[in-house]
Image: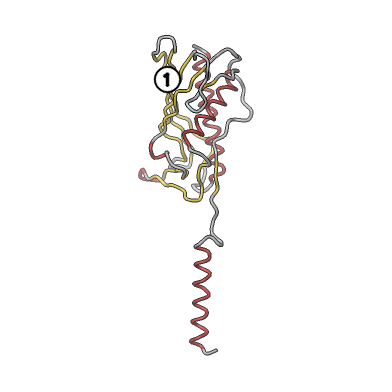
Amino acid sequence: MDRKKYFKSFVLSIASLFILFACGGGGTSIRYYMVDAVESISPVADDPNLVVEIMDVHIPQYMERFNIVSRGDENQIFFSDNNQWGDNFRKNLLRTMAQNLSDLLGTNDIGTPINRTLSKADYRLQIHIEQFERDYNGYVKLVARWQILDNQEQRAVSTHNTELMSSGIYAMDDYENIVRSMKDLYGELGRLIAVSISTR
C-alpha cells in the first residue's frame, strides 16, 4: 500500500471512530434522578385524624422540564442533557411532600391533585418554589413560601417563607450529591411546613 492510500485509510478509520462515539457507541449515557422522601425523619406531631390537602406545588417555568438545571455566573442557567429527572419534576415534588408530611404529622390522610383525599381537609396548603437548584457558588439553594388555608373559612390563616442552603459545595457535574442535597433540603422544607401546621 503506498503512502497516499495508507493515509486515506487512516483518516477514514479515525472518522469512523468519531462517528461511532458521536452516535452513542462510546458516548455518555443519560442518568435519571428523583427527589425522594426522607428515609428517617423525626415526627413533629402524631395526629392520625388530621387531614391536609396540598393544593399544588408551584415551580418556575424554567424548571418545567426533564433536564436538571443549575445556575452559573451572571444569571446564566444551564440544563444538563445527560442528567435528567426520572418523572415530571412538579409531580415528583408533590408526591414527595405528601409522604414527608405524612411521616412528620403522623397522618396518612394527605391529599394532592394526583391523589385526592376523600375526607374534608382541616387545612389546605399552597406551596411556591421560587428557586431550587445548585446555585452559582456551588451551594444547593431552596427558596420557598407557603400558605395555610383554613378549610372552614376558605381563607389564608398564615403565610411563611424560607431560604435554605446546603452545607456542602458541589461541582456543577456532581449530580449525585446535588440531588441528594436537594432531597435533604426538601425534607427540611417539609419539616418547617409541618411545624407551621401543627402549631396552629
Q: How is the image coloured?
A: secondary structure
Quarter of image, res 168: top right
Give above or below for 128 relative to 179.
above
In percent of width and height, residue 73 lies at 39, 45
Q: Residue at x 51, y 47 (%)?
A: 83
Q: Which of these two is toward me, 160 or 34?
A: 34
Secondary structure at badge 1 equals: strand
List the residue tagged with mark 1.
147
In percent of width and height, residue 118 lies at 52, 17
Q: Which of these two is toward me, 24 or 175?
A: 24
Q: Residue at x 47, y 50 (%)?
A: 81
Give above or below for 156 relative to 191.
above
As drawn, which residue projects farthest toward the front? 118
In percent of width and height, residue 7 lies at 50, 82
Q: Residue at x 51, y 88 (%)?
A: 3
Instruction: Identify the amino acid type marked 1.
Output: Gln
As drawn, which residue projects farthest toward the top? 152
As drawn, which residue projects farthest toward the left? 74
In percent of width and height, residue 111 lies at 51, 22
**Total numbered circles:** 1
Q: Which of these two is toward me, 190 or 121?
A: 121
Q: Quadrant of the N terminus?
A: bottom right
Give above or below for 97 relative to 137.
above
As drawn, which residue projects farthest toward the bottom? 2
Assess disc 1: are there few (<14), some (14-19) or many (≥20) residues with their C-alpha within 10 Å of its C-alpha: many
